[in-house]
Image (cartoon, rainbow, N blue to C red):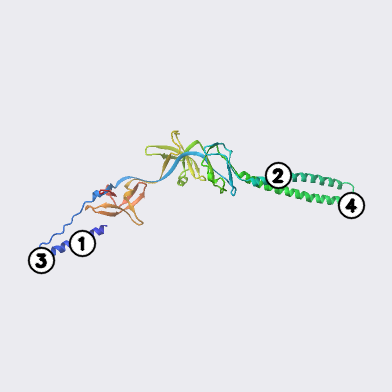
Amino acid sequence: MKHKTLKKLACFSALILLTSALSGCSGEEVPRLSISSEDVSEDYSMVDVDYGDVVLEETISCLYSQINEENLAFNIEKRELTHIYVTDGDKVTAGQLVAKLNVDDLEKKLRDNEDLIAQDELLIDETNKLIDYYEGLLRGSIGLKRREEIEFKVSNARQELDVYENEKNDCERENNEFADIIEKSKLYAGIDGTVSNINKSLIGTKPSKGSTVMRIINTDHCSFVSRDKEALVYFKVGDPVRIDISEEKSYNATVIEVDTVGERVIMDLDEPDYSIKMSTRGTINIELERADNVLTLPREAVHTTEDLTYVYILTDSGVRELKEIEAGLMGTKLVEIKSGLLPYEQVILRKTRRYS
C-alpha cells in the first residue's frame, strides 16, 4: 500500500514538472495541477495500543438439570416391541416392568421343554430303578442263560437312560438360552423417577439394539451438567469452577463427577440455590494461557494471513496503510503486540458507517 502511494506521488510530481516545462517554452500560461488530500479519519473507528492482560480461554457450556436419569433400551434385537406399560409423566420405581418385546414363541418352546424335562426325569428315575433291580438279580445265584438275558436288559436300559438324559440336557440348555432372551425382552426402570420421552414410533417395530425406548428422570438431585467433550479433558473431581449465568449472576461450584462413559461432567453448587430453574444455562471460562501487563490490541484490529500479521493505520495525509507487526499470545479478546507498534499509537479498529 505504501509503495503504491509513493508511486502515485512520483507520477503527480513528474506531471507537474512536465507542465512547468511546457509553460516555459511556449510563453503561454498553463493551468497548474492542484493536488488535495481528503481527510478520511472520520470514516474509521480508531483504538490505542495500550497495556493490558491477554488471556486465552476455553468456554465450556453447562445446563442445570437432574443428574439421576437413564435412557432405557433393549439389549437384543429382531423382536417386535408389543407392550409399553407406562405413559409420559408416570411415576415408576426401580425394578418396575415398563415395556416388553414379543417372545411368545420362545415362551411356548420353554413350556414344551419343561414338560419334556419333567417326562424325562420320570423316565430316568424309573429306568435307574429298573437297572438297580436287574443288577440285584445279577448279584444272586442264577443260571447262565438267565444271566445273559438280564445283562442284555441292563444294556438296553442303560442306552435308554442315555437317551433320556441327553434329551433332558438339551432341553435344559435350550431353556437357559430361551430364559435369557425372555428376560432381556423385558425392560425395567433402573431408578425411581418419572417417565419421559417415550418413543411411540417403535411400537409394532423391531427396534435395533440400543435404541432408546424412553427416559426415566429423577429430580431429587439437580446439578450443573456439562456434556461438552472439552470438559472431560480440562476437569477432574474436586476442581473448583465458576459458572456464569449472566454478566451479573454467577455461582461457585465443585466438580463431583467426571463420567467418561456417559460423557458428562457434574458440578454441585457450593451454596445451594433453590430458586434456580431447571434447564438454566451457564458457561465456564477456563484460562489456558495469559500474558500480563503487555502491549495489546483488540483481536478485531489485528489481521493475519499464513505468513503475515498486520494492522491498518492512518497516515498523516489521511491514507489507510497496512503495517506489519509481530504478535505474541492471541487471547480470547486481546492480542499481545511484541513489536511494530508503540504504546498509545492508534490503529484502525473498524470502518464506520458515515454514509447511508
**Disc 3 marks which amino acid?**
Ser
Q: Are marks 4 and 1 in contact (CB under 8 Å)?
A: no
- Report, in whole angstroms, how far the alpha carbon at label 3 lies from the one at label 1: 23 Å
Give the mark toward the camera: 4 or 2: 2
Near mark 1 (Cα within 10 A), the count class, few <14, some 14-19 or many ≥20, is few
**Disc 4 marks which amino acid?**
Lys
Give the mark toward the camera: 4 or 1: 4
Q: Identify the residue under disc 1.
A: 11
Q: Residue furthest bottom?
A: 25
**Disc 2 marks which amino acid?**
Glu
**Disc 1 marks which amino acid?**
Cys
Q: Which comes sooner in the sequence, label 4 or label 1?
A: 1
Q: Which comes sooner in the sequence, label 3 or label 4?
A: 3
SS of the residue at dot 3? helix
Q: Identify the residue under disc 2.
A: 114
Q: Is residue 105 visible?
A: yes
- Report, in whole angstroms, how far the alpha carbon at label 4 lies from the one at label 1: 139 Å
Q: Which comes sooner in the sequence, label 4 or label 2?
A: 2
Give the mark toward the camera: 3 or 1: 3
- Report, in whole angstroms, how far the alpha carbon at label 2 lies from the one at label 3: 129 Å
Q: Identify the residue under disc 3.
A: 26
Q: Is residue 186 left or right of residue 313?
A: right
Q: Are marks 4 and 2 in contact (CB under 8 Å)?
A: no
Near mark 2 (Cα within 10 A), the count class, few <14, some 14-19 or many ≥20, is some
Q: What residue is rendered at 83% in x and 50% in y?
A: 153
Q: Identify the residue under disc 4.
A: 145
